[in-house]
Image (spheres, rainbow, N blue to C red):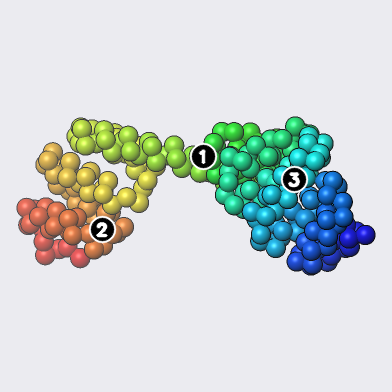
Amino acid sequence: SYHWLGDLLLTQQNWDEAAIAYQRAIELNPYNPWSHHNLGLALTEHGKLDEAVAALNQAIGLSPNQYFEFYQNLGNALSKLHRWDESLTAYGSAIELNPGHPQLHSSLGSVLVQLGKSDQAVASYRRSIQLKPDDPEIHEKLGNVLRERVQVDLDQAISCYRRAIRTNPDNLENYHKALGIQSNDPELYLQLGNTFVKQNQLDQAIIFYQIALQIQPENYEVNAQLTSVLEKQGKLGSRE
């Protein structure tokens, strides 16, 4: 039959011919959900994603809430179209039908990352790892989202310290906390140097200006401030 021919062509990765075979099968028997599903697979691989989504939805319409693969592959096609909310729903339906499938939880986690729901993504990846502890790809995905979440927290912390420094530039503790997170920021060393200048601790100011220049040698403002301090100390000739 055309359906089995389509299956054969699918295993041979002959996507275009497989799609044609499944379409012929559907013409002869439009009520076989697997013909629609497999047509959706062939169309997905062939890059015809909108048509694939239509075929997969047709399969689900003929056999709702029975086969997790229908929802999984619908989620895959929708993800490729960046239709994240719909993909989320599809993967959720697949998990309801097969909660012990690790790839479903991993795929759901990836969609949650795209939707900015990092806490839920972490939970999905961890569930996937519980089901398949030795899959390096899922561990990598979990590591990535945890790192990104930490980076967001650190960026927010830096922003808070910067606001604190602008409000109270004489509080040295905030500089040290900020530099503990972002040690290669020349602007922080410049501001710290300026604070020491105001406190007339010129040797300390020079140290921090020089650190700023090691990071960003062409920074005009740092060069100007360092030159000014060295002139005050009569050390301009000794500057390298």
Q: Is residue 7 visible?
A: no
Which of the two marks, 3 or 2, is nearer to us in this view? Answer: 3
Q: Which amino acid is tagged 2?
A: Leu
Which of the two marks, 2 or 1, is nearer to us in this view? Answer: 1
The secondary element bearing badge 3 is classed as: helix
The secondary element bearing badge 1 is classed as: loop
Q: CA distance from mark 2 to mark 1?
A: 37 Å
Q: Is residue 240 left or right of residue 119?
A: left
- Residue plotted at (42% across, 39% down): 154
Q: Which amino acid is tagged 3?
A: Gln
The secondary element bearing badge 2 is classed as: helix
- Residue plotted at (76% across, 41% down): 60
Q: Which residue is mark 1?
A: 116
Residue 4 location (% of width, % of height): 90, 59
Residue 56 location (% of width, % of height): 73, 48
Location of residue 118 (image quadrant): top right
Quadrant housing the N terminus: bottom right
Label ID, residue 213: 2
**Along the polypeptide, which appears first: circle 2 or circle 1?**
1
Label ID, residue 79: none
**Along the polypeptide, which appears first: circle 1 or circle 3?**
3
Q: Which residue is mark 3?
A: 58
Cβ atoms under marks 3 and 2 closer than 8 Å: no
Q: CA distance from mark 1 to mark 3?
A: 30 Å
- Residue plotted at (17% across, 55% down): 221
Which of the two marks, 1 or 3, is nearer to us in this view? Answer: 3
